[in-house]
Image (spheres, rainbow, N blue to C red):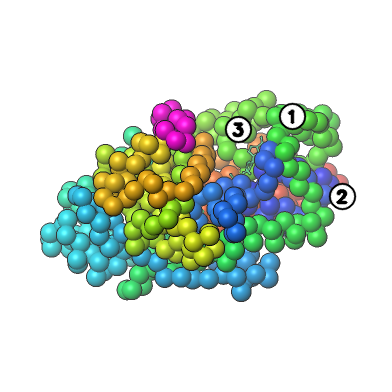
Amino acid sequence: MKKIAIIGAGYTGMIAARELSKYYDIDIFELDSTIGGMAKTFDAYKTPLENYYRHIFKSDSYAIQLIKELGISDQLIWPKTKMGYYSGGGIYEFGTPISLLKFKPLNLWNKFRFGCSVIKIKTIRHYEKLEKISAHEWLRKYAGKKAYEMIWEPLLFSKFGSSYKNISMAWMWGKIVLRGSSTDKDGESLGYIRGSYQVLTDALEQDLKNKNVRILCKEKVTKITKRKNKYTLLTENKQYAGYDIVLSTIAYPYFIEIAENLIDSKTLKKLKKIQYTAARIMVLFMKKPFMKFYWLNNGNKDIPFGGLIEHTNFIDKKYYDNKHVLYISNYMYENDPLYSISKNELFKKYVPMLKTINQDFDPKNVERIEVFKERYAQPIITKNYSKIIPNFKIQEENIFIASMPQIYPEDRGLNYAIRLGIEVAKQIKKQDSVHTKRDQ
Ligand SMILES: Cc1cc2nc3c(=O)[nH]c(=O)nc-3n(C[C@H](O)[C@H](O)[C@H](O)COP(=O)(O)OP(=O)(O)OC[C@H]3O[C@@H](n4cnc5c(N)ncnc54)[C@H](O)[C@@H]3O)c2cc1C
């Protein structure tokens, strides 16, 4: 049996392994001590909790199918959630037609234009038409300057910082059309796995074990070399030789570091074009609730975080020792001081901002703080992005890449990591059968 090395035990890597395990002998290399990648959890009192807030949309068919195949559908729940928007010093319900009517910061005409822009996006069938235009241009034109500046611009800015004017409208289309599928007139129903995503990761790990896939944790791959058509992976601890195929699921800058000598110039050029924003997420465990919403988007550009996610307005606080759990989501560039200051310094900076949003917020009610960061958290999806998406296969090599920037036009997410894992596995099998036929 041919041997495949997969780099990264996130969902893309694990799903690809699951798809390929019938045909290949597979080792997955993971630098961390646990698996799951960005979908990892930590110990929050009695129940694990995701490092990064997490939910499933009704349109996440790949995630829902995986949950079914792993026999844990009975753990998938769909609580109703409420979304809010912070703007001009007030918090408003958001996300439904009725809430739009009640949204005070916009006058009736601007609300009408905003509503029309959302309807127009939802009626567009093919994103290709939107590729060439930025979300900034399109939304300003169709929602009007006022609604754009009040709602869309802060959302784009919070995720992409200084690049926000260059984001493709195709990306925004993917985001709005898909999120809309989880919303009805009464609000949004989002999916969650009772007991956390760790339940899904554990079930997947067991399934991989049953399929004889080896997962090697605490094995950071530092270099890939090739001799006589076989690849060797050097890790910080050892070297592993004899692989016929390598699949990398790690962020491109990391992949370039370990394999630059094997990447053809055309692919390398494409990989280097892809930029990312980083994310630093703070989790507060509090004695009192912060707000009544699950998700609050921030429309105030002076406050650096894009959103507040009160997980315990989605999932009962009884799972977390009756603490109220609030995520503070902040996307930024890696060189932003907020990315590297200490947890306590960051919290001190956030306190006055949290008080601006909710004057009753008292830091004394915060009993525990956790922070997590991701250097390559969100690919920056610019205009005509489809032209710079790299292929799965590196030319002249049996090395494949599958990573978040290859998800398009949908916004990256666990559902699409699963789809990507399935797609790259298909490509590997197809490519390998072509080679086998030619070689015979
Ligand atoms: C703040 C935040 C919130 C999110 N919220 C949601 C949400 O609500 N719903 C949703 O569906 N998605 C959400 N996502 C996105 C989702 O988590 C990702 O799209 C998905 O988990 C990506 O999976 P992946 O396997 O492609 O990559 P990763 O999960 O990044 O997996 C790559 C793995 O490779 C490992 N690795 C890196 N370098 C090496 C090396 N040299 N050697 C060995 N191993 C290495 C890493 O440790 C990691 O485990 C969120 C992401 C972020 C950052």
- Residue 136 appears in the picture as rendered: no
Q: How many marks?
A: 3
Residue 254, disc: 3
Front in this rendered view, residue 116 or 188: 188
SS type, badge 1:
loop
Q: Nearer the viewer, mark 2 or mark 1?
A: 1
Start and end of the magenta stretch? 335-345
Residue 223, disc: none
Tell me, yes or no, whether the highlighted magenta stretch contains residue 2.
Answer: no
Residue 236, disc: 1
- Residue 49 appears in the picture as rendered: yes
Task: Respond yes or no on whether mark 3 lies under 8 Å from ligand 1.
Answer: yes
Three-letter amino acid code at the position of disc 2:
Met
Residue 396 is situated, as x and y percent measured from the top left of the image, at 70, 35
Residue 417 is situated, as x and y percent measured from the top left of the image, at 58, 53
Residue 1, disc: 2
Q: Residue at x 34, y 62 (%)?
A: 292
State which quadrant residue 164 falls in: top left
276 up-or-down from 39: above or below: above
Closer to the chain start, of discs 2 and 1, is: 2
Front in this rendered view, residue 233 or 134: 233
Q: Residues within 10 Å of mark 2 (few under 14, many from 20)?
A: few
Closer to the chain start, of discs 2 and 3, is: 2
The residue sitting at the front extreme is 364
Task: Respond yes or no on whether mark 1 lies under 8 Å from ligand 1.
Answer: no
Q: Residues within 10 Å of mark 1 (few under 14, many from 20)?
A: few
